[in-house]
Image (cartoon, grey):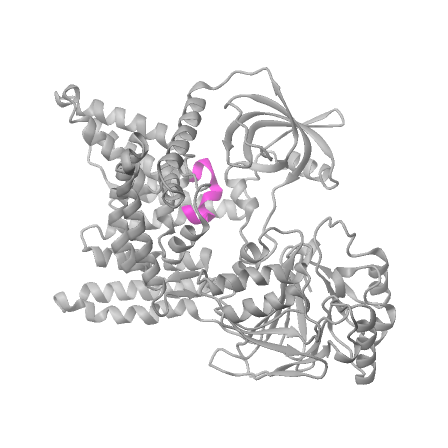
Amino acid sequence: MTRRPLAFLCVLCIVFITALTRLGLPPERGQARKEAVEKLLEVPRDVTVIGEVLRSEEQEDYSYLILKQATLSVHSQNYIISNVRITLKTPVHYAVGTRVSVFGVLKKTERATNPGQFDKSFYYRIQGIGYTMSNPSIETLPSRIRLLPEILAVLREAMRERIRQSYPSETAGVISAMVLGDKSLLEDDVRTEFSMGGVSHILAISGLHVSLFGEGIYRLLILIPFFKKGRKKAAGVVSVVLLILYAVMTGLSVATLRAVIMFVIMRGADLVGRTYDPATAIAFAALLIVLEQPLYVFYSGFILSFLAVATITVFRDRSGPVLGLALFMVTLPVICWFYYEFSAYTVIINLIVVPLMPLFLLSGLFGTIFGGGVYGIFSLPAIWLLKAVLATLSLFRKLPYANFIFGQPAIWQIVLYYILLMGFLFILGKCRFGKRRFLLFPLVIPIVAVLAIHVRSGLSIHFLDVGQGDSCVMEMPGGQNIMVDGGSSSVYDVGTNRIIPFLKYEGIQELDYVFLTHMDSDHINGAKELLCAVRDGKTALRVGKLVLPYLRERGEAYLEMEKLGREAGAEVLYVETGDVFSFEGGGGIFKADLPASFEILGPNPALETLPVDENGQCITFAMTCGKFDCLMTGDVQNAGEEGLIKVLREADYDAEVLKVAHHGSQYSTPAEFLDIAKPEVGVISCGRGNRYGHPHADLVRRLMAAGTEIVRTDEGGEACVWTDGEEYWWRSYVGGGA
């Protein structure tokens, strides 16, 4: 690096900017105005926002546009705010540059409220978007259309429509994602196959695609007689201009931007007669991107893109398998940090699939330009290639240990991993085995295993923020993992978007037990998503036992859940009052020797009536770990709650932590119950601004009168309680703890 002073200076500048950004210095532009605006928006209200259309996208059943230079008007006061994303229920296009006035409810972008959850707020901040609006009324104002961006936008939409007409949906989605950066046509099954195969990077406009496009244009141009006659430099300029226009048309992702900058530097070096140095180009491109948006240094796309191209630069003279292994080893900690899992066969899969992608791209573009043709002759090559790729991915996914869920590693694990990796590379370079160096490759296994270390020193209970619903994940001291409920009536695809990402984040490969207290959708729809994913092989997660309340009269939802549990490979158990589950401690060097147990307090078959009161007959249980007790009450009410009170009184039971019943409804958790249980902390799982008014003011007053500290998922996000069997602590993901 010292032989490349410019590259070294760029790296130092990036490190300096990263440190300042981490410290919050300098403050984001307009921070004071932002705080004033957010205070105004604490109470939902209709406001007027005026801005200029930066981007407008039509989908099949909705559309969205992004406004820049936005001004918020409230009570005759105007505030300049960051970009606003407007979502509309109908497909409609607004030309780039159009000034519009929108009237509706302005909201802050949503931040993640659970570990592992996609942080939409951070993703939007990178794009300069601070607020969102859904289905406002829109009025077009006098404005000047920005001709070039609008031409590119219209061209992109025309190409997307052409791809959709020329190819079956399976192929069209992949071509649209790779060529236009548009994943709206991508089918879920195809996305899952690529993701689990460790080649999801192919479904984005990566540096490889941009380099192929730019270099392809340049090579074609120099074949034209005009450019052959000593005008190669002119061909370089034209290829740069066309590549920049293509990058702008496709949305200018960070990987695209990196590849464009490096291509411009390469052609620029050729233009002025200088030597192109990839290392300097990489460092300079990174600095330019970070100067434009410092938050990129914490963004997965930025880190993986530059790590990958740097690794390729270092190992470019090595064989394909060595380069593939190097890419895997260098990027693995970053993949685990952001995505929590990886494919065990990713090196082999990439060696097979990636070389096919240029051919797929070219055939896809050919079919797009000329259409399907007679009998689909022009579109067939791309269709066949994709089928071959999907068949390859499916084959590897069926092999043993195809995917591993590592969870997010700790910083010390990542540091230790890279130290061991550098040691391995040093030994590999110094050894005298010659072509037999591959005999050292088994040393990779213990290095990778460093990222899989999970230390459990106690019991962790995670009450997830699932909106208006319930979901709790317990990590037992002995290594067992238990989920109690998983559903929501306010969060779309709660299992896919919140529950499964949390399980992966925690490194949970198997749920030993899934308890479903009753069959209300706000307790089970996310669990159904999880079981369906397990059944269909769309996740590496497994479920051991599905635990349901014992009922003589079982409804359709109950029977469907039984069937789904068995299809997912889970053993179905039925519980009632008096059943006990014991969980031994120990179980390995990184497990705590601390036993725990569940005592089932409900349902009581003697109290079952017709029609069945599923809330009253839901599963309730008391968990004990050393001196720590936690009471899980589901949605218990009526006769079930009366029976629970009777059991607790006879057992003289009290609890440190109570999962408050029925999301904090008005008549749940009566004073008599609180007098007996004496909970020190009460966790209420409910959604922000829910239409039921949960938690009800009467319930809150009862908890406060009983001396119970209230923890709410709608205010603090996921609530985690940890105990060593003697003492316990709690914290909220958003709001801190005690």
- Measured as percent of width and height from the top left, residue 340 is found at 45, 60
- Measured as percent of width and height from the top left, residue 73 is found at 70, 27
Judged left or right of residue 562, residue 96 is: left
The quarter holding residue 598 reads bottom right
The residue nearer to you, when weighing 372 against 197, is 372
- Measured as percent of width and height from the top left, residue 216 is found at 23, 34
Q: Spot the residue most to the front.
A: 375
Residue 184 in magenta stretch: no
The residue nearer to you, when weighing 451 against 685, is 685
The quarter holding residue 617 reads bottom right
**Is 446 situated above or below 227?**
below
Judged left or right of residue 474, residue 540 is: left
Residue 291 in magenta stretch: yes
> Could you tell me which residue is drawn at 85 percent across and 74 percent down?
675
The residue nearer to you, when weighing 709 against 147, is 147
User: Is residue 699 at all visible to an observer of this figure?
Assistant: yes
* Helix, strand or loop for the magenta stretch, by majority: helix
**Is 448 situated above or below 40?**
below
- Measured as percent of width and height from the top left, residue 515 is found at 62, 71
User: Is residue 505 at all visible to an observer of this figure?
Assistant: no
Image quarter (top left, top right, bottom left or bottom right) of the C terminus: bottom right
The quarter holding residue 540 reads bottom left
The residue nearer to you, when weighing 272 against 4, is 272
**Is 206 situated above or below 194?**
above
Question: What is the span of residues highlighted in magenta in the rendered image?
Answer: 290-301
Counting the numbered discs, the total is 0
